[in-house]
Image (cartoon, grey):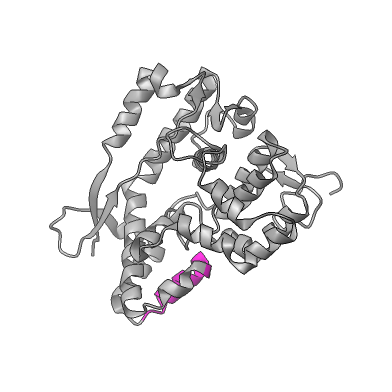
Amino acid sequence: MKGMKKPLQTLSEPDLWEPLYQLEVRPDALERELFQSRPLRRLKHLHHYGAGALISPLIHSRLEHTIGVWVLAKTFFPEWRELHVAAILHDIGHLPFSHAVERALGYDHHQNTEQAILSPQVALVLKKYGLSPYKIVHLLNEYTPLTNASNKLGLDHLDSFLRDTQAAGFSNIHPSELISRLRFKGPYIEADEEIAIHIMDAVLNENLLFLNPYFLGVNAVLSEAVHLYSVQRPELGEKIAGMADHELLVKLESAESAAVRKLVQVLLWEPHRIVECDPDTPGSIRTEIRKIYDKQPLVGNLAVSDIRSDVHARLQELEALRGTYHFHIYP
């Protein structure tokens, strides 16, 4: 219909409508060419929530997340061209189903992303428009509004927290309203106390959701299936970087190993059989929580947990979730 917003991800229209933030952005020629390239299109076929997408309504892709981060970068920093490009490329090194598969194969998606940016398929596009691939890689390793190695919040994690919790129905304030009340202090997101608390609700809910035993269980089963498959087919490690989620599942479903086929059968059709168990349960699958996503916005010059004891206490509760967990498939 004429005048209707078009949330198309083909970038075949002059403007792109981002529905989560209710923003319309016009990509330049470089951005359009990157989004229409195979490395970026592949992200449409990678679930942002990993194997958790197989058992929940959180089925958005890494492309939705990437577009969201890019739109935020262009909105808050409209003249910073390199940051816009870094936002587009920041996730292109993810493997199918992301972290679960990375653990099974010993991959680091940050290193994969750097290699992908320096590959001819991406580097030639950047050079065509006068940008250095090495500069983009360097930017991704710096403290920028996109991301940083501290516990301060940047745009990458902000989009994940808001997008995931909105999809799960946990938001108390719509992301489009929330972002209108944000600003930056250097590379860090800053907000008033009210909005900072809303953001921390999203951060805490995201962690509790992602670290739920059901999500841990399906990721552990997928990781085990990939590990067993790669033992018999070590060439998987060389090919997987360019694969989509469904392509990996097809390989696992047709594996020579009956054990692999059984795991994938349960994962796809009987995930209710995956349950937490004691470490000494025969055939149990082990997984570990090492990382907590505890990013925080600033309120003035301080992290919100420095001024709110309740937020500090809730973050400490998250830290208590670190540890080893075991799962098995009941008969």
- Magenta part mainly helix, strand or loop? helix
Work out whether residue 93 can be spotted: no
Quarter of the image where one finds residue 328? bottom left
In front of the other: 107 or 15: 107
Q: Is residue 118 left or right of residue 313?
A: right
In magenta stretch: residue 42: no
Compared with 222, 57 (above or below) is above
Q: In this view, does 254 lie to the left or right of 130?
A: left
Quarter of the image where one finds residue 151? top left
Numbered-mark total: 0
Q: In this view, does 16 lie to the left or right of 208?
A: right
Q: What stretch is highlighted in magenta?
A: 242-255
* Residue sitting at the far left: 280
Compared with 234, 181 (above or below) is above
Residue 262 screen position, x and y as percent: 32, 72
Compared with 250, 293 (above or below) is above
Residue 26 screen position, x and y as percent: 77, 46
User: What's the residue at 36%, 57% (across, down)?
Assistant: 219
User: What's the residue at 55%, 25% (across, down)?
Assistant: 190
Q: Quadrant of the C terminus?
A: bottom left
Residue 136 screen position, x and y as percent: 60, 51
Residue 307 screen position, x and y as percent: 41, 17
* Residue sitting at the far bottom: 256
Work out whether residue 25 can be spotted: yes
In front of the other: 328 or 252: 252
